[in-house]
Amino acid sequence: MPDGSGKKDIKSLLPDELAAELKAMGLPGYRAGQVFRWLGRGARSFDEMSDLPKDLREKLAAAYDIPCLTMLRRQVSAKDGTEKYLWALPDGESVETVFMRYQHGNSVCISSQVGCRMGCAFCASTIGGKVRDLAPAEMLDEVIRTGLAAGAEVNSIVLMGIGEPLDNFDNVLRFLRLVNDPAGANIGMRHISLSTCGLVEAIDKLAALHLQLTLSVSLHAPDDETRSRLMPVNAAYGVDAVYAACERYFKATGRRVSYEYALVRDVNDTPRHAALLAERLRGTGSHVNLIRLNYVSERGLLPSRPETVKAFAQRLSDEGVTVTVRRRLGSDIDAACGQLRRGGMRDR
Ligand code: SAH
């Protein structure tokens, strides 16, 4: 248990599991629904559950713990209204969550681990390695509490914050089921994106579940030599293995994988890289999301020049690959991709 209380984490239980537990305690079926709804609304204690009798609240509090996040800091971008939250977890660790407003709705970018062990050369979140996985309840609470703090509905979720979600597979899956539940946040799988550095076995495991979520794969280079410079994970799963896994994923789920590609000056942004990438992706219907590298001072790599980004995108598009260049929301508050946790760590 994150807080060392030894009590069971009630918020990570799926509705049918919660129902079974409460039934075993001799409670009528509707109680589980009541508790689940309170948890989904962000109740911090059983005492808040005012439609439960007092003795039941006490009984639940003796057996269960409700893991909750506490806000340490909130920053709002003066440029685009993007909000970044630093949350304390029950054991005192911390993670960041980003809230973004788009024309089509509000999106929350959540963290799935405290730190990350993937070691990508350009990313701030992996400095210091992985501390621990987040529990399903903690990821759920990122969504709930960020929505409450922003005073707005959350319409979609991206698992693109701190951590490698497929390196915390079981907890992430449980979180997806919790947040997708109609009695909870009720966010449809098609409104959820999961980004991975390309853990092939886990991609296959996910494919077998046939979820309708969007899978993004962080490719960042079309050849093993370049990719290995940027991503240590490439030693285990090379470019060909990643492409093959994405094809199997598409076959199994009917959902095309999209590729993330952060442009790093003079490392992966040359015309040769664009040509190689186009050659592999042409005709596959795959989408490439280009991101101009966000500069992370500790990492020493530089963002590509704006004209290089343009030329790279043009080359892909000319060769028939659909491509978008991602906007840098929240750049003035270090909320952009790969920058999370740096600010939070500095303050501690
Ligand atoms: N571990 C997962 C998800 C977290 S990172 C993954 O690797 O996909 C979300 C995205 O931001 C990934 O595509 C990641 O490669 C990218 N990213 C990390 N650091 C970045 C940086 N400094 N600039 C731009 N993108 C970065």
Image (cartoon, helix red, strand yellow):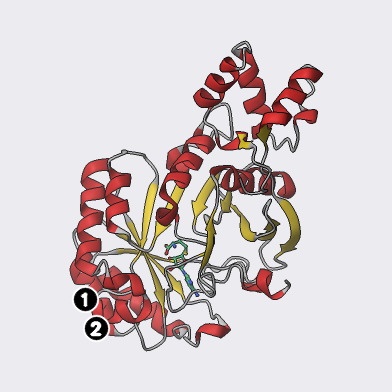
Q: Is residue 250 above or below residue 227?
A: above
Is residue 117 shown left or right of residue 278? right
Query: Dot 1 corresponds to which residue?
Result: 276
Q: Position of residue 268 (x, y in %)?
A: 34, 81
**In the image, residue 13 lies at what x, y percent?**
54, 32
- Residue under the point 55% across and 69% down: 328
Q: CA distance from mark 1 to mark 2?
A: 6 Å
Q: Residues within 10 Å of mark 2 (few under 14, many from 20)?
A: few
The residue at the point 55 percent across, 80 percent down is 296
- x, y percent for residue 333: 67, 70
Q: Which residue is mark 2?
A: 272
Residue 132's tag is none
Amino acid type at mark 2:
Arg
Determine whether, in the image, residue 269 is placed left or right of residue 332.
Answer: left
Viewer-proximal residue among 158 and 142: 142
Residues 312 and 176: in front is 176
Amino acid found under the numbered disc labelled 1: Leu
